[in-house]
Amino acid sequence: MSKLYTEMTKEELLAEKKSLKKRYDAFKARGLKLDMSRGKPGADQLDLSTGIYDVKYYIADGLDVRNYGMLDGIPSCKQLFADLMGVDSKNVVIGPNASLTLMYDYIGQCYTHGAGDKPWCKLDEVKFICPVPGYDRHFTICEYFGIKMINVPMNLDGPDMDAIEELVKDESVKGMFCVPKYSNPQGITFSDEIVEKIAALKPAAKDFRIIWDNAYCIHDLVDDGDELLNIFDILPKYGNEDMVVEVCSTSKITFPGAGVSAIIASDNNIAQIKTRLNAQTISYDKMNQHRHVQFFGNADGVREHMKKHAKILKPKFDMVLKHLNDELGDKGIASWFNPKGGYFISLDVMDGCAKRTGELCKAAGVTLTTVGATYPYGIDPKDSNIRIAPSFPPVEELDIAAELLCICVRLACVEKLLEK
Amino acid sequence: MSKLYTEMTKEELLAEKKSLKKRYDAFKARGLKLDMSRGKPGADQLDLSTGIYDVKYYIADGLDVRNYGMLDGIPSCKQLFADLMGVDSKNVVIGPNASLTLMYDYIGQCYTHGAGDKPWCKLDEVKFICPVPGYDRHFTICEYFGIKMINVPMNLDGPDMDAIEELVKDESVKGMFCVPKYSNPQGITFSDEIVEKIAALKPAAKDFRIIWDNAYCIHDLVDDGDELLNIFDILPKYGNEDMVVEVCSTSKITFPGAGVSAIIASDNNIAQIKTRLNAQTISYDKMNQHRHVQFFGNADGVREHMKKHAKILKPKFDMVLKHLNDELGDKGIASWFNPKGGYFISLDVMDGCAKRTGELCKAAGVTLTTVGATYPYGIDPKDSNIRIAPSFPPVEELDIAAELLCICVRLACVEKLLEK
């Protein structure tokens, strides 16, 4: 098959549909139960870190980390994150088991106490910029706090900066969530030019805040992974030190749910965060912080560890990409980005065909991320984006699931074209 | 010495002062550095739980707890807390490493989203009832959210219910923090009558919430510890199921900062908490939850473990009480409560003498909890309450620190009486 679907006659489409339906039914008959819905590490990835619990002594930096104290984290763990992220340890606060909570709590703090200006709960309207497609959990936080989300398209080098520069002229636009490296779901890393433009923004709102969710900061799949500019090196040039709050975690380095997170911010922002933390906790889990430091030794130790993850993950991504190429490469009905890292492959199909693809997959036993979830309010205006999470299933299962997914995409598109 | 200080002549007081000053100076010359400021477990108590990390397999309830999921905790851990607290596991949500965070987050939730009525941030004024003396961290949460605190005195059987019944007639009075068992700092357990009266309250505010901080639920020092009525058994009688939100944790069972916390509430409240949690986290640390379940086996296992803590703590409390009895027992200048559990001894000295006692102690190398901290805004109106935390120092150190404390109390009181 090398003919574009869009150039097929009705008869050709009907024939194509018939042949696809036959393949689809054969898959369906197998009673599959496969899951490509969430960016969960596989069990073999989790096994890489179980040695972390061999740590037996809990004296760190001269202190018994089993006891109360050290609100912002143990010094050695702050230093580890400072080294990884290229910042000063005074600008690092170690958080709980997930950076999601750090983000939620930070937005909560802005909502109840503001970010240097009025508390956001006292304002009539708060809006956030959302590069799309994006991460559903960011949207959920906005939705919970009643923050109105405004879509901005992602380009191949990052978000559409013309649109953003226009939007920030509105004082009620108070911030933006983004994943600057190996973005969720596309795997796009913001180019140096985009990072510079973001750092140079002049928002009308003095308390504009960018949540720089660097979830995949060292999560390369290949040796020549993407490089992301350190935005904290650039912000001072524009007097914008307080504009960006960065988070990261070991959720996909050690354990999802039992890792360590960190928040990185300016002196001013760190001071406000610590004021809140002083009411919210006595300290996060310092034993876990200490274990992480002991297990990795230093930042290079973490980077070495990530190569083991890549070795497991790369074949999974390759398997999905092979099927996308084989089945969808020459039909003019789908496009995707081939990421050098991160946890997802983002597949864009013909407008109006994503939901139907998800339904067909589900009926044949393959669960995808809920179609639409990559957009605010769960509404993909074009109904075209599908997030594929290849990390959890074994390669053999991905082989089946990805082929089936491609068949479903083709079927959905043929159905759509036949409607016309 | 058996004469009351208040009955001494000026000459007798001067002689007493001279003799006390001599003892005080001798202590001061020793260059002590002792800490009775915080309710920290001793290192030997922490050693009781290090075996928890011997757990090697992380499959619980058929699921790999190292991975994402299970927002409200693993079922076996929910059941463990349900058994300990005498509730249904559906009314338990497992939280992060500290119940303090659960309380902060719950008040934050009421502030941003309300508790079934208007969000508290939309109201002109929110007031909370604070039984005093109380726990400084509760006051800090209120202060952070701008909640106005109203003192209500603690009696020997719990808070003054006449005062509370009067206060709740004010619709802007939205809640109360309390520690119903082995209260911080007095170690008082609310009597059955008081618990019943609390459960029967008819607050004007429909969204009145009592934070039932059961921090010392199983923290007995003696075999015949106090029994606290389970308020959740009584609330339905008065249609008040939603009025109480209970928290507890293993901070003083396993590790402060690396334990597991739980929040217990009505179906309605749990639903609201889960809605928030769904935006705030994917799950708390389930590996730690699983370790706790494996280490203890069941609720009886936890109770047995607490006997080991009591064995370490009881001699420490006894040492402090011995000195209080010996030095302050017959002077008419101090009173204290002899608790059957918890982490503190609350010492009330002659009005206007607590701060001075703290100063004298500090100058001689003994740190007490900041005097005043047991009251909202750090203001003890009578300047009389001192919180003693005997858990952290070894018995030998307590022997010295408690004697010195008593000397300081006596000196401060003599000074005060001489002013008249």
Image: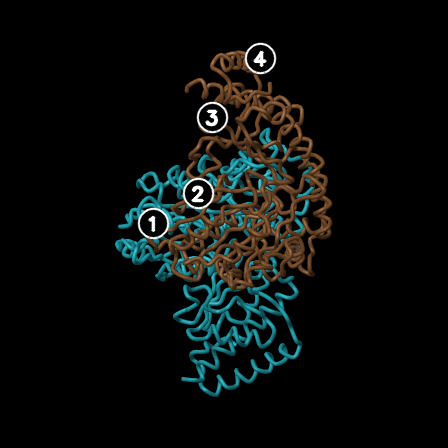
Chain colours: A cyan, B brown
Check disc 2: other Cα within 10 Å, few if <14, some if 14-19, many if 20+.
Answer: some
Q: Which residue is mark 2?
A: B151
Q: Nearer the viewer, mark 4 or mark 2?
A: 2
Q: Nearer the viewer, mark 4 or mark 3?
A: 3
Check disc 3: other Cα within 10 Å, few if <14, some if 14-19, many if 20+.
Answer: many
Distance between mark 1 and mark 3 Cα atoms: 41 Å
Q: Nearer the viewer, mark 2 or mark 1?
A: 2
Give the image location of residue A401, x and y in percent. 60, 69
Decide if residue A148 is in sight here.
yes
Image mark 4: chain: B
Answer with left or right where residue B330 lies relative to residue A235: right
The label on residue A119 is 1
Image mark 2: chain: B
Quadrant where the C terminus of chain A lies? bottom left
Distance between mark 4 and mark 2 Cα atoms: 40 Å
Q: Confirm whether circles 2 and 1 share one chain.
A: no
Q: Which residue is mark 4?
A: B26
Q: Which residue is mark 3?
A: B353
Q: Amino acid at mark 2?
A: Asn
Decide if residue A40 is in sight here.
no
Distance between mark 4 and mark 3 Cα atoms: 22 Å
Is B372 or B59 nearer to us in this picture? B372
User: Looking at the image, is B85 positioned above or below residue B31?
Assistant: below
Q: Earlier in the sequence, mark 4 or mark 2?
A: 4
Q: Amino acid at mark 4?
A: Ala
Q: Amino acid at mark 1?
A: Pro
Give the image location of residue A102, x and y in percent. 47, 48
User: Looking at the image, is B168 positioned above or below residue B330?
Assistant: below
